[in-house]
């Protein structure tokens, strides 16, 4: 289990250590002792702040949901809406990689709490797309349900498959330049597509 480098309050440090452990090893495989060791505190102190593993996990889930809402909630934008959305999605992946890996891992394992967070992510994307549709920025006939799912799947898929992605790139996906490449390529995929209709 990784050793967290989080700063802030003891409770936040413990929560960060739990998130990292849950994302890397899974909830079942991560014990209170593991979390305590990663946070640099005693198991007793973990249980002082979070009386049970269930309470600790609930705190992690609440944090991950808040992170998603902060990144994806519909808001007024002055300037380029596409660039704003692209920046927010990229920041969500780059700055909260473990949070998304935690959700992706849980969804793959059919975990109920992770599936609820997946629902939240998808609904936030659906709401954002509905706003773009009202602004006349979406093509006619777009399947909003699948458009929202594609947004979530590209983000979670990249996170959960990061070892393979980094292997293909020949360098860490999380390197600043590689994250920018991913942002530019993904934005182009959504905005312009890949195939030329005149040659199809």
Image (spheres, rainbow, N blue to C red):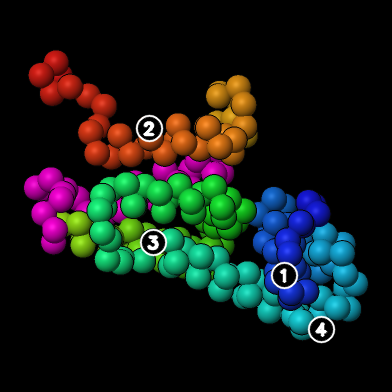
Q: Please give the residue where the numbered disc 4 appears in the rendered image.
A: 48
Considering only vertical position in the picture, is 126 above or below 157? Answer: below
CA gap, disc 1 to disc 3? 24 Å
Q: Write down the region rendered in magenta.
A: 134-161
- Counting from the top left corner in percent of width and height, residue 122 is at 37, 59
**Chain-order first, disc 2 or disc 3:** 3
The quarter holding residue 128 reads: bottom left
Q: Going 46% across and 63% down the picture, which residue do you hit? A: 68
Q: Residues within 10 Å of mark 2 (few under 14, many from 20)?
A: few
Q: Can residue 53 be seen in this view?
A: no
- Counting from the top left corner in percent of width and height, residue 150 is at 34, 46
Quarter of the image with the C terminus is: top left
Kind of element beneath mark 4: helix
The quarter holding residue 6 reads: bottom right
Which label lies toward us, 2 or 1?
A: 1
Q: Please give the residue where the numbered disc 3 appears in the rendered image.
A: 72
**Chain-order first, disc 3 or disc 4:** 4
Q: Answer with left or right where residue 98 lies relative to residue 83.
A: right
**Marks 1,3: beta carbons within 8 A:** no
User: How many labels sit on residues?
Assistant: 4
Q: Going 68% across and 79% down the picture, which residue do you hit? A: 55
- Counting from the top left corner in percent of width and height, residue 129 is at 24, 57
Q: Going 24% across and 39% down the picture, which residue do you hit? A: 191
**Chain-order first, disc 4 or disc 2:** 4
Q: Please give the residue where the numbered disc 1 appears in the rendered image.
A: 8
Q: Answer with left or right where residue 121 lies relative to residue 113.
A: left
Which label lies toward us, 1 or 3?
A: 1
Kind of element beneath mark 3: helix
Kind of element beneath mark 2: helix
């Amino acid at each position: 289990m990784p050793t967290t480098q989080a700063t802030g309050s003891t409770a936040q440090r413990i929560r960060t250590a739990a998130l990292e452990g849950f994302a890397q090893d899974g909830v079942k495989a991560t014990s209170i002792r593991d979390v305590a060791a990663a946070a640099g505190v005693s198991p007793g102190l973990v249980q002082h702040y979070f009386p049970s593993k269930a309470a600790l996990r609930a705190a992690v889930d609440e944090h991950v949901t808040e992170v998603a809402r902060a990144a994806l909630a519909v808001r007024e934008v002055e300037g380029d809406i596409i660039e704003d959305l692209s920046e927010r999605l990229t920041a969500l992946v780059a700055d909260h990689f473990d949070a998304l890996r935690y959700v992706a891992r849980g969804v793959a394992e059919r975990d109920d709490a992770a599936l609820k967070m997946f629902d939240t992510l998808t609904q936030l994307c659906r709401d954002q797309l509905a706003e773009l549709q009202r602004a006349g920025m979406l093509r006619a006939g777009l399947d909003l349900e699948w458009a929202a799912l594609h947004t979530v799947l590209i983000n979670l898929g990249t996170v959960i498959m990061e070892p393979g992605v980094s292997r293909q790139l020949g360098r860490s996906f999380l390197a600043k330049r590689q994250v920018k490449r991913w942002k530019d390529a993904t934005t182009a995929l959504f905005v312009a597509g890949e195939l030329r209709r005149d040659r199809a």
